[in-house]
Structure formats: C-alpha cells, structure tokens
Image: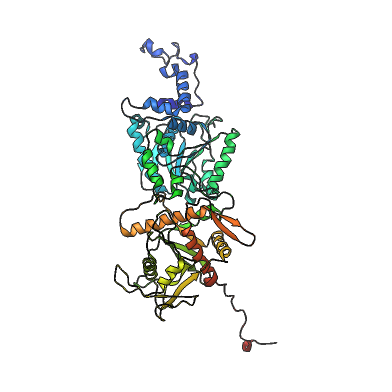
Amino acid sequence: MTSHNNFQNDNFKYSKSSSRSFDDPSFNSQVKVNDLKKNSFEDSFDKWLEFVQWARWFPDLFYDLIKPETGGMRLDLDQRLFLRCMSRFVSTYGVFPRGFGKTMLELMSIYHTCIFFPDITIAMSAQTKENAASISEEKHNEIMKWFPLMKNELAKAPSFTKDSVEVEFKSGATYSILANSQTSKGQRRRRLNVEESALLDNFLFKDALEPVVNVPRRTIGKLATINPYELNGMINYLTTSGYRGSDEFNRILNMLDEMADLKGKIVLGASWELPCHYGRGETRNQLLAKKNDPTTSATAFAMNYESRWVGATDGALVNITKLLNLRTIPKPELECPKDKRGNLEINEYILGVDVARSSAQSNNKTAIVVLKIIRNPKGLIRQIQLVNIIEPPNGLNFKEQSIIVKRLFYKYGGNQDLSKSRVKAIVVDGNVIGKGLIDRLLEDVTDTDTNEELGCFDTINTDQKPDHEKAVKIIYDLTATGINDEIIRTFIDYVETEKLKLLKINDEIKKTSVHGDDSLVEEERARLHTQYLIDEVSNLKLKKTKNSITVEQVQKKIDKDRYSALAYALYYIFLFLEKEAEEPNTYEDDDEIVYY
C-alpha cells in the first residue's frame, strides 16, 4: 500500500524512450533480456493512479478492501456516508448522539488521509490535551484490531502519553493532538478536526484554532507545488449538540447556508434512533427508559441523545456563550478551607436557598447555592464564585431541610458571633412555601445524625421572633414580589460584567450518576449541578410587560430552582455588600493647610 505514495512526485515522467539502449557503454551485457522489460510499477502507473483516485474518493471501500476475511469492522450505511463526507468536503459539521461512534470514524478518516496524502500533518483538538490523548489511544488500538493491515502503514510505533500523541506514517504524514485553548496558538497543521465543538466560543476559535490550517500542503516532488484540487485548510467539527444562541449554533446556521450555496461545506446530524437502528450503542428500551427516568435531566438527554440544540433563541435571558465562558473555577469548595496553621481562611460566603417541598422527583426541588466573594485591596468585589450547589432530596419536610441549611452554615465557617462568621447571610426565598423553612430555621434543632445542637437563627429584615434572643441574625427573608425585575437585571449584570464565576465542567459531566470516594462524589455533584444550572438559564427567556420584566421557561419540564437560588443571593450581594471604591483623600486637615 505504501508504494502508491510515489504518485505524489510531481516530477515523475514516463515514456518508452526512457528505456536503456543496448548501445549504452555502461550497459551490462550479462543482464538478462527479461530485465529490459519496463518496470512493473511504470507499466501499471495508470492503474495505480486510478486506484489512488478511487481510494481517496471512497474511504469506506478502502477499509472494506483491507478488512480481514473474518472479523474486522462492518461499516453501516450511515457510517459510510459520514466517512465519504469527511473526504470530499472542505468542512463537515457532524452533530451526533453518544454511542454513534463518531470519534472512531473521525480517526479512521484521519488515518486514511495520512496514507493517501504524503507529508500531511493532521491534528485532532479537544477540550484538553489529556482528553484528546486518551480518546486517540483508545480508538487507535481499535483500528489496529479491526484492520491489522494498517500496522504496515506506520513508520514506527506510535507515541501516546498523558498529554501528547504522535503517529507517523510511511508516507511521511503525521497525526497529533491539540487543545481547544490558547495553547494551540501558533501551531501549524494542514487539516484539523475539532472534538466537542459545541463547547467552543468564536473568539477562541478565530484567535487560536482557525489559523492552525493557514499553510497548505505541498507535493513531495522536486517542484513542491500546491495541488489546487486538494482540500487544503480543511476543518471538521464533531460534537453532541449544545445551546441555541451559542457561537457554534450560529456557525451551523451559517454552514447550512453555505451548504445550500454549494460552497463545499456540509452539515450532518442524527438522533439516537439512527445508531440504534443499526444495533450500535444502547438498545431502544434502554434509551427510552433513560429518557423517562425522572432523575434524568431532560436537557442533558436532548443534547446527548436527541441531538437537539436546547434553550431560547430569541429573547434569551443572557448570552449563552458569555455564560459558558464564566466556567473558570477549577475545583468546588465543599467547606471553608483552612490555612497552614489550621485556622479557617478569611473568606466571605453567602448562601442562597430556593425552597420547594414535593415528594415527586419530577417536581421543583429545593436548591442551595454557595457564593464566595473575592475583593480587591480597596474592598471592591472583583469576583463572585459559585463554589458549590446542593440539592436536598425531594420529600424532606421543612425541619429536615433546615438541618441541611444549618449544617452548611457551620461547614463554611458560620459562627454565632457574626464578627467571626465567614457566612455573612443566608438568603431564603420567602414567597409562600419558603415561609415554612424560615419558621423552622428560627427554631432550636438537634442534628439527627450527630446529635449536635445546631441552635436557632434570626432574620435580618423581619420582626419574626426566634426561640431565644441570642440567635444569630443571619437569615434574609427575600420576597420577590414587586422586585422581580430588579433581581433579573442584577443577575444579567453580574453575567455581562463577568464578575460571576462558575465551576469548570468535565467533558463527561452530563452523566447522571457518580461513584467512589465521598468527597469526590460531592465534587462531581457540584459540577453536575453547575451543568444543570446552565441548562436552566439557557431555557429561560425574558418576557416584558407594561411595567416590569420577568422570565419564562421555554420548556416547562425544565426547572429553574438553581437559577432562582443564585439570583436571590446575587441580589442580596448587590444590595448590601457592594461598595464604591474609597477615593484617596488628596487634602490635608484644615489646620495643616498653609495659605500664601
């Protein structure tokens, strides 16, 4: 298979006159007459050329050709179409569900290109190099297993490390990986495949990734020319779906227009039903059970399996791309951290609680957010970090919910002495049902698990009486009636100014279950609930009335509890904790001023 690479030599010429003559003084008369026959390669040049053209145009049939007689990988019709599009269009955007096998097909397409385009360099980019390296090694091993002849095309054993990949082919081509980040800026490859492109923002793409393929491949002959018919600068995008209104959603809309105008681009998509029809991935019954499971996020299922872009397109609450860019916090805080001496760090926390009470898992749930305030030396709030989100189990009565809230108060450095307390306020939704939780928070209570006394709290802004007068004034009873538009504007402002920061979300965080060490489980839950928060916000759109604004859900079955808890806490911070920078006093005291 490697010999056909010589066809890329643009200086190759063949004619009958190229045969050596018997009159040539250097001719060895001992050579047999049979050796005077034209070289078999030269004799079959036209056939080899036709084979290369055929193999480049039909990558699926090329894989059929090298598949072993027994075993090997059987390509389904949809997979064949996908492979052909990756070889024939200057840009392919594929939106496919989990279990489709898109990453395997992507690497098969890359390896096919490396064989038939000498000296080409191709990269796959993912959210992190670690993720790209992991999936590359796994899919490489599968290709070598299903198509053993591919091993003959490798120049040497491939290199796979934690954050790098290098696969060299006998054609001189090289496959490597990049990250969807600024670290890829300045890199150069001839073609690029972007994994999980729905998570990209356009600024990063334009600044760091798009320029990667600016330099086209040159042929390997003496002339080293650029083939005008080659798909130089190819960028392919592969992903599960994301949010409407995001940069990638708009990119797909633009590519659909370019596809209609025959500009060499194509958009492909499918739901879980297509791979399920061919027997790939989970069965129909398993997927339908997952869809109907009340613990499964409707948004996550729509994106992961139905390939539907979710959220509001017109009148969205916030720019979803900007919201996604707020995910910068590397790790959740499950409690107030301690310094080297074992003392609690000097932090400020605000707890926000949106209250619900229902035994049905499909109904609204109570949500608790933990916000950490970061100030600059002048005391101005620089960041508001959402370091944890907790969702108590449904069906708990108000007493049980109050115990959870009080436990969190002490975990984050809460103290009966407010001057020493790291928690500055607990903002509770006091509308109707929330009054029940506030009543319980004002009562003395014993922790049912540890038998510790959790005490009682008092409200900051109401005349309600706690069980005893020494209760810490920490509860802010927030009644949204009449101020809902102010709460919404405050939320929008903190997103737009990028003061609000969210937890980073792992690539596979859309899963709905976690296992392992308790602290790791809690961390993954915090990340999972951050994903759900983004789902909730993306599902909200602004609704304007004559005198105010409100939000409404695009899909009613998607809750907004986490958003509400966050919005209430942010509103409290805006009202009471924001302060203007103190201007330096440029004047001396009056008695020290000297008049001339």
235 and 52: which one is in front?
235
Q: Which quarter shows the C terminus?
A: bottom right
Indicate whether 222 appears above or below 401. above
Residue 125, by quadrant, is top left
Q: How many marks?
A: 0
Query: Which residue: 54% across, 30% down?
Result: 227
Query: Which residue: 48% across, 44% down?
Result: 241
430 and 471: which one is in front?
430
Q: Is residue 347 visible?
A: no
Query: Which residue: 48% across, 66% down?
Result: 432
Left/right placement of residue 242 relative to residue 149 reads right
580 and 460: which one is in front?
460
Indicate whether 334 appears above or below 307. below
Residue 473, by quadrant, is bottom left
85 and 22: which one is in front?
85
Q: Position of residue 271 (x, y in %)?
A: 45, 39
Q: Position of residue 136 (x, y in %)?
A: 39, 41
Q: Position of residue 53 (x, y in %)?
A: 48, 24
Residue 168, by quadrant, is top left
Q: Is residue 22 visible?
A: yes
Indicate whether 382 appears above or below 187. below
Residue at the limit of the structure toward the right, as seen here:
596
Q: Which quarter shows the N terminus?
A: top left
Give the colouring mode of the picture: rainbow
